[in-house]
Image (cartoon, rainbow, N blue to C red):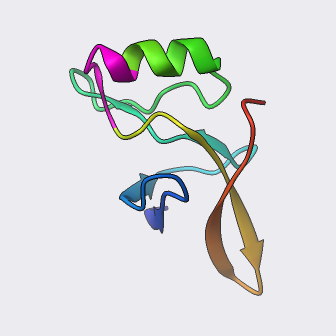
Amino acid sequence: MNLFVVCPHCQDFVEILEINCAIFRHAVFKQTGQQLNPHASKEECDRLTEQGQVYGCGKPFQIVTNNGTHEAVECGYI
C-alpha cells in the first residue's frame, strides 16, 4: 500500500506504507529511510528533529478513513 497524505502540522506530503494502529509521526530517518516509531515520545521526536536526523516535522497524526478516503488529522503523543 502506498498512500500519500498531507501532514496536518506542516502541510508537507507523507508517504504511508502500511497502516496498523493508524498513529504516525511525520518523521523518516535520513540514514535508513525507515519511519519513526509511531508511539515515540515528544521528547524523542523533538530531539531527532532538532538534530536533523529525520525528514519531516516529527509531529503526531492519525489516519482517519471515511467512505474509502484517507485523511491525516492531528492527535496527541499517544
Location of residue 29 in the rendering, given as x and y in whole percent from the top left corner: 32, 26
Which residue corresponds to the image point at 51% horizontal and 21% vertical from the top-left?
Answer: 45
Which residue corresponds to the image point at 48% horizontal and 20% vertical from the top-left?
Answer: 46
Q: Quadrant of the C terminus?
A: top right
Q: Residue furthest bottom?
A: 67
Q: Is residue 22 above or below residue 50?
A: below
Location of residue 56 in the rendering, given as x and y in whole percent from the top left corner: 36, 40
Among the 4 quarters of the image, the one containing residue 43:
top right
Q: Is residue 50 magenta?
A: yes
Q: Is residue 54 magenta?
A: yes
The magenta region covers 49-55
* Number of marks: 0
Location of residue 47 in the rendering, given as x and y in whole percent from the top left corner: 43, 12
Which residue corresponds to the image point at 74% horizontal and 65% vertical from the top-left?
Answer: 64
Among the 4 quarters of the image, the one containing residue 8:
bottom right
Q: Is residue 5 above or below residue 27?
A: below
Drawn side of residue 60 relative to residue 16, left or right:
right
Location of residue 69 in the rendering, given as x and y in whole percent from the top left corner: 65, 81
Drawn side of residue 32 relative to residue 9, left or right:
left
Q: Nearer the viewer, residue 19 or 9?
A: 9
Among the 4 quarters of the image, the one containing residue 77:
top right
Q: Residue furthest left?
A: 31
